[in-house]
Amino acid sequence: MEEVNPSSLSIVRNNLAMQGVSKAAQDVICKSLRLGTSKQYDTYLKRWEQFCCRRNVDTVFAFVTDILDFLVELFNMGLKYSALNTARSALSSTIVLRDSVFSVGHHPLVLRFLKGVFEQRPALPRYNHVWNVETVLNFLEELSPLVSLTLSQLTSKLVSLLCLLSGQRCQSLHSLNMNDFI
């Protein structure tokens, strides 16, 4: 099991303790955060604490207006929808709104704010081009018979087919182990 970022954990634990949650329950709740999530949340929880110190705002029991002001501050720093949505999720995991039955993540004003951010700074597609798989398959088909291929050509053909069949991202391919396929 991967270890969760201790910095995020201390913020989450502190906020849970201030809400009266027992240590045993805190331990279980903290296990819900994976390492990747914790790393993403850490930045925004630290910024939230700094924001609260500057504005004399309670870090655990906040008003929705405080949340909106914090998100505006991040927005004015140039952050895009995805980053602000992560900040919202981080805050929602630890903050109790004083003036609402909604969680931070489900409050109508927070949702409308994020919709406004999305309209002003829409998320760009992750990939700006696509390629035709059929072209690659046709090329690979021409690499035959296998006995006539060099080791380099055979390796390239195998890796290309593995990429297409596994759907893995390029950065995941380096961790492939042949023993996993036998």
Image (spheres, helix red, strand yellow):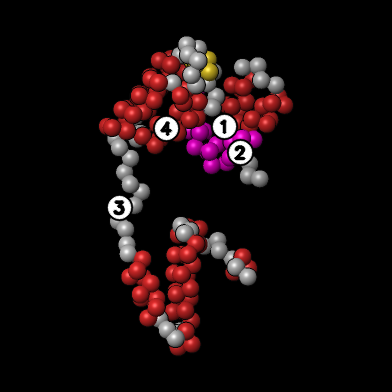
Q: Main secondary structure of the magenta part?
A: helix
Q: Secondary structure at mark 2?
A: loop
Work out whether residue 99 or residue 137 is closer to the camera in this orientation and state it.
137
**How much space separates mark 3 and mark 2, taking CA atoms?**
33 Å
How many numbered discs sit on the rendered protein? 4
Q: Secondary structure at mark 4?
A: helix
Q: Is residue 141 left or right of residue 19?
A: left
Q: Is residue 12 left or right of residue 140?
A: right
Name the residue: 39% across, 37% down. Answer: 82
For label 3, the residue is 128
Q: Secondary structure at mark 1?
A: helix
Name the residue: 48% across, 19% down. Answer: 102
| Rendering quarter of residue 122 | top left
For label 1, the residue is 8
Name the residue: 66% across, 45% down. Answer: 1
Label 1 close to label 4 by CB (< 8 Å): no
Q: Residues within 10 Å of mark 1 (few under 14, many from 20)?
A: many
The residue under label 4 is which amino acid type? Answer: Asn
Q: In the rendered view, would you say 178 is above or below 75? A: below
Q: Earlier in the sequence, mark 3 or mark 2?
A: 2
The residue under label 2 is which amino acid type? Answer: Val
Magenta-colored span = 31-50
Label 2 close to label 1 by CB (< 8 Å): yes
**How much space separates mark 1 and mark 4, taking CA atoms?**
17 Å
For label 4, the residue is 85
Name the residue: 32% across, 62% down. Answer: 131
The residue under label 3 is which amino acid type? Answer: Asn
Residue 144 lies, in percent from the top left, at 42, 84
**How much space separates mark 2 and mark 1, taking CA atoms?**
8 Å
181 magenta-colored: no
